[in-house]
Image: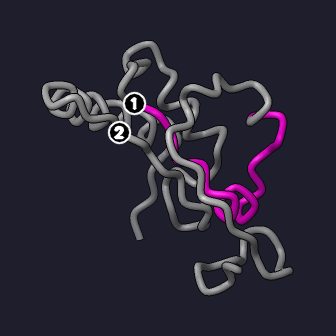
């Protein structure tokens, strides 16, 4: 399995989001990036995802986040990160719960 640094992940995410946002903007479409709370996913916490969309080069009106409560809990996203965000950057909210397993071990089958 190839590993990537957090810097590589962020740089690539910024590049791809800008490319997609340029295309979407022509059609009046907004993009909602979803972090996935699994250890093997590259962007797996809320704070990491928000950091990507709020960079100076991606901070665009048509780019925001999906806030999925299961994924937020699954990798231990921090409530302090959520409290600091611009609420207008949360485009979609998924409300769901999780089985009582330890953070970092949850998978989609553990959703409630």
Near-viewer residue (83 or 76): 83
Q: Position of residue 36 (x, y in %)?
A: 54, 60
10 Å neighbourhood of mark 1: few (<14), some, or many (≥20)?
Answer: many
**Where 18 sits versus 69, above or below?**
above
Image quarter of the N terminus: bottom left
Left/right placement of residue 93 relative to residue 79 reads: left
Q: Position of residue 88 (x, y in %)?
A: 57, 25
Left/right placement of residue 76 relative to residue 19 reads: right
Q: Position of residue 21 (x, y in %)?
A: 26, 30
User: Looking at the image, do the residues carrying marks 1 and 2 touch, with CB atoms under 8 Å apart?
Assistant: yes
Residue lying furthest bottom: 109
Left/right placement of residue 20 relative to residue 62 reads: left
> What residue does disc 2 label?
31
Residue at the image position 44 percent from the left and 13 percent from the top: 56
> Exactly how many numbered labels are in the figure?
2
Image quarter of the C terminus: bottom right
> What residue does disc 1 label?
63
Residue 29 on the magenta segment = no
Left/right placement of residue 69 relative to residue 36 reads: right
- Rendered image quadrant of residue 98: bottom right
Residue at the image position 22 percent from the left and 28 percent from the top: 28
Instruction: Name the secondary structure under disc 2.
Output: strand
Near-viewer residue (46 or 9): 46
**Where 74 sits versus 46, above or below?**
below
Q: Could you tell me how far apart the alpha carbons at marks 1 and 2 are, in whole angstroms?
A: 5 Å
The range drawn in magenta is 63-81
**Where 11 sits versus 58, above or below?**
below
- Rendered image quadrant of residue 31: top left
Q: Position of residue 48 (x, y in %)?
A: 60, 40
Instruction: Name the secondary structure under disc 1.
Output: strand
């Amino acid at each position: 399995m190839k590993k990537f640094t957090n810097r590589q992940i962020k740089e690539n995410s910024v590049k791809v989001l800008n490319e997609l946002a340029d295309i979407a903007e022509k059609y009046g479409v907004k993009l909602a990036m979803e972090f996935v709370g699994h250890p093997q996913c590259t962007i797996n916490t809320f704070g990491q995802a928000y950091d990507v969309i709020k960079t100076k080069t991606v901070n665009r009106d048509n780019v925001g986040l999906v806030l999925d409560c299961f994924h937020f809990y699954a990798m231990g996203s921090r409530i302090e990160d959520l409290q600091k965000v611009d609420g207008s950057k949360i485009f979609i909210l998924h409300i769901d719960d999780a089985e009582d397993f330890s953070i970092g071990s949850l998978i989609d089958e553990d959703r409630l």
